[in-house]
Amino acid sequence: MTDWAIHGQEIGNCNCNPGCPCQFSQLPTDGTCEALLTYRIDKGHYGSVKLDGLYAAVLYKWPGPVHEGNGQMQMIIDERATDEQRAALEAIMTGKDTDEFATMFSVFSLMSPTRHETLSAKISLDYDAESGTGTATVGSYAETKVQPIPNIVSGDPHFISIALPNGFEFSKATMACGTTQTRNAAITLEKNSGTHAHIAELHLTGRGVERAA
């Protein structure tokens, strides 16, 4: 099995209520799931292939809960990636060289039998922890904007985070609300407006989340 690791940041937005029932092992808010996950890799490798400084994103859509499968996915890779880097990122994001169910890449890929053509684009990810606002832009295909969850009474920013000691995506993440717009991709997200978003530091290998990172 090829050794790999990625360390960086993720912005994710799905169609559920802020907090996301999946994080609490519950069914999705409206029974379906659709999401855009965007990654910045500060340091990473796949075997001898360096991945430092690259970005990637994946669009997902399921007709029901993720664990029931029948989903579809489409990867978008940083346009600066070489052929070797592109192949490496595709391998990681489809769960190759990964212990079964050890990462979200493995789980989501196994639950997405329909894989659309991988796209290439200029990708960026910016997040300001103090204000809780950020943007992930995936070329002309998609854009996610995140902000703090508004207090239900005052509307003031409501900052909250959750810890997942045994999670397959992160150990801790900041919860937010986000909106994603998609265009020109094979997968269209139609329900992601003011819905769940999270921002997390990623420390992943083929064996799962590095807890001590």
Image (cartoon, rainbow, N blue to C red):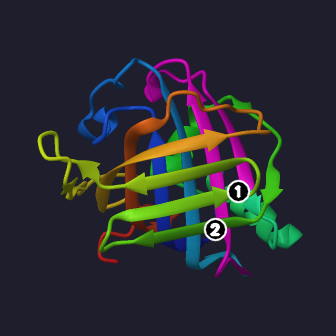
Image position of 9 (left or right of 81): left
Label 2: which residue?
124
Q: In which quarter of the image is the N terminus?
A: bottom right
- From the top left corner, tell me how far across and down residue 71 is, in percent: 60, 26
Residue 165 rendering spot, x and y as whole percentages:
23, 57
**41 or 13, which lies in front?**
13
Residue 173 vertical position relative to residue 52 in the rendered view, above or below: above
The amino acid type found where label 2 is placed reads: Ser
**Left or right: 213, with 183 as reference point:** left
Residue 46 image position (x, y, % from top left): 67, 72
Location of the C terminus (image quadrant)? bottom left
Q: Tag 1's secondary structure?
A: helix
Label number found at residue 129: none
How far, Cα to Cα, is label 2 from label 1? 21 Å
Local SS, label 2:
strand
Mark 2 surroundings: few (<14), some (14-19) or many (≥20) residues within 10 A: some
Q: What range of the chain is rendered magenta?
A: 49-76
Disc 1 marks which amino acid?
A: Ala
Q: Does the magenta stretch include residue 104?
A: no
Q: Which of 134 and 96 is in front in this view?
A: 134
